[in-house]
Image: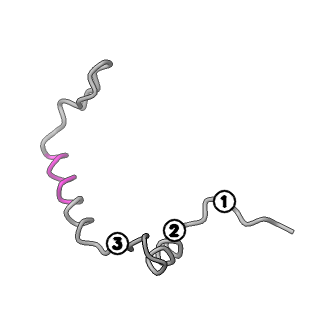
């Protein structure tokens, strides 16, 4: 079981299998294309993929 000591910010006792699974997922995510939000096209792609968190105003 993972433990979080109150005054120590380091996480301890993580199962090595959990770490290996997370590393595998991180590697897969790193290979996925990411839109460059510094460009107009990249920002448009991100906005198209992301759900709206603020509902549109109603008339």
For the point 24% across and 66% down, the residue is: 30
- Image-based side of 29 in relation to 15, left or right: right
- Image-based side of 46 in relation to 58, left or right: left
Q: In front: mark 2 or mark 3?
A: 3
Q: Residues within 10 Å of mark 3 (few under 14, many from 20)?
A: few
* Residue bearing mark 1: 54
- Quadrant showing the N terminus: top left
- Image-based side of 1 in relation to 43, left or right: left
Counting residues from the start of the chain, the first of labels 2 and 3 encountered is 3
Query: What range is drawn magenta here?
Result: 17-24
The circle drawn on residue 34 is: 3
Q: CA distance from mark 2 to mark 3?
A: 13 Å
Queried whether the magenta region covers residue 20, the answer comes back as: yes
Q: Nearer the viewer, residue 44 or 58?
A: 44
Q: Nearer the viewer, residue 39 or 7?
A: 39
Q: Give the SS element for disc 1.
A: loop
- Image-based side of 28 in relation to 16, left or right: right
For the point 78% across and 65% down, the residue is: 57
Q: Give the SS element for disc 2.
A: loop
Q: Main secondary structure of the magenta part?
A: helix
Q: Give the SS element for disc 3.
A: loop
For the point 17% across and 46% down, the residue is: 19
Q: Residues within 10 Å of mark 1 (few under 14, many from 20)?
A: few
Q: Residue furthest right?
A: 59
Q: Position of residue 41 (x, y in %)?
A: 46, 81
Q: Residue furthest bottom?
A: 41
Q: Position of residue 10 (x, y in %)?
A: 23, 29
* Residue bearing mark 2: 50
Q: CA distance from mark 1 to mark 3?
A: 23 Å
The mark total stands at: 3
Q: Is residue 10 above or below residue 55?
A: above
């Amino acid at each position: 079981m993972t433990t979080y000591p109150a005054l120590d910010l380091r996480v301890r006792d993580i199962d090595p299998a959990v770490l290996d699974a997370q590393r595998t997922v991180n590697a897969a995510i790193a290979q996925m294309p990411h839109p460059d939000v510094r460009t107009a096209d990249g920002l448009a792609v991100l906005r198209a993929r992301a759900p709206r968190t603020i509902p549109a105003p109603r008339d």
